[in-house]
């Protein structure tokens, strides 16, 4: 199969309902082989950031929050949306300060991933900041309730092992900095 056999043709796009964090788009796409038409959902959104923050003591700054999609508390890296007229570094610094009260430090870009290319049009930028210091009390958004945890690498690994840290974007960022699991990784089915 040639590469051209994989490329779909967009025949038209129409807007869907407005959502708080996403603009919905419905694309009519033409199958590259059969020419059959399909409607595909695209959620347009700004880029996101994920921050691996390490204070001078070597712990990792993590946050715990309730996630509506899964209906449970999760432990995650600091993360958020890149606001309009903001670059990903500025967003990462803002989110870290708002969610945890930590700031400053030495920042390094870890690259980006496609958040969910099946339906999202954005990137998630990963940042590492070392030697962060506590500056102020956290100021989360009005729709957030966050608990900050300073965790050792072993505690992060344990949190992954017991299934409290499953967020793929946070795991992606953390895995660019720390060895999180043994290779080859074979998980037990639960």
Image (cartoon, rainbow, N blue to C red):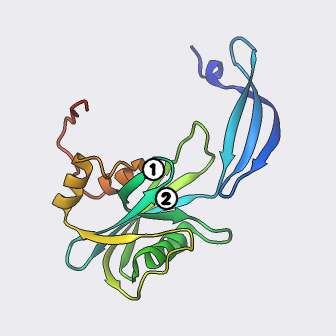
Nearest the camera: 93 or 1? 93
Task: Return the x and y of residue 86 as percentages of the image width and height.
Answer: 62, 71
Counting other residues with Cα less than 10 Å from the Cα at mark 2, is it few (<14), some (14-19), or many (20 or more)?
Answer: many
Residue 110 can be seen, yes or no: no
39 lies left or right of 188: right
Task: Return the x and y of residue 122 as percentages of the image width and height.
Answer: 60, 51
103 lies left or right of 185: right
Say which quarter of the image contains residue 62: bottom left
Q: Is residue 145 above or below residue 153?
A: below
Residue under label 1, please give it. Answer: 71
Q: Is residue 190 above or below residue 66?
A: above
User: Residue placed at 66% from the left, 45% from the top?
Assistant: 43
Task: Return the x and y of residue 126 as percentages of the image width and height.
Answer: 44, 59
Say which quarter of the image contains residue 21: bottom right
User: Residue placed at 68% from the left, 41% from the top?
Assistant: 42
Most distant residue in the top direction? 34
Circles 2 and 1: CB distance less than 8 Å? no
Nearest the camera: 105 or 20? 20
The secondary structure type at the circle numbered 2 is: strand
Residue 33 can be seen, yes or no: yes
7 lies left or right of 106: right
Residue under label 2, please give it. Answer: 125
User: Residue placed at 63% from the left, 58% from the top?
Assistant: 46
**Foreground: disc 2 or disc 1:** 1
Task: Return the x and y of residue 6 as percentages of the image width and height.
Answer: 62, 22
Counting other residues with Cα less than 10 Å from the Cα at mark 1, is it few (<14), some (14-19), or many (20 or more)?
Answer: few
Say which quarter of the image contains residue 148: bottom left
176 lies left or right of 155: right
Most distant residue in the bottom direction? 135
Task: Point out the image quarter for the C terminus.
Answer: top left
Task: Point out the image quarter for the N terminus.
Answer: top right
The secondary structure type at the circle numbered 1 is: loop
């Amino acid at each position: 199969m040639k590469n051209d056999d994989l490329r779909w043709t967009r025949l038209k796009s129409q807007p869907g309902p407005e959502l708080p964090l996403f603009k919905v788009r419905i694309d009519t796409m033409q199958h590259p082989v059969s020419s059959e038409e399909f409607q595909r959902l695209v959620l347009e959104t700004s880029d996101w950031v994920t921050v691996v923050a390490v204070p001078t003591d070597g712990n990792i700054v993590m946050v715990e929050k309730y996630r509506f999609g899964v209906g449970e508390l999760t432990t995650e890296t600091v993360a958020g949306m890149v606001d309009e007229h903001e670059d990903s570094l500025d967003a990462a610094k803002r989110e870290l300060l708002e969610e945890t009260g930590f700031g400053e430090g030495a920042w390094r870009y870890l690259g980006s991933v496609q958040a969910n290319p099946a339906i999202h049009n954005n990137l998630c930028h990963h940042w590492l900041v070392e030697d962060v210091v506590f500056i102020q009390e956290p100021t989360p958004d009005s729709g957030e309730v966050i608990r900050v945890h300073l965790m050792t690498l072993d505690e992060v690994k344990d949190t992954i092992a017991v299934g409290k840290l499953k967020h793929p974007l946070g795991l992606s960022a953390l895995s660019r900095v720390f060895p999180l699991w043994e290779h080859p990784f074979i998980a037990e089915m639960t």
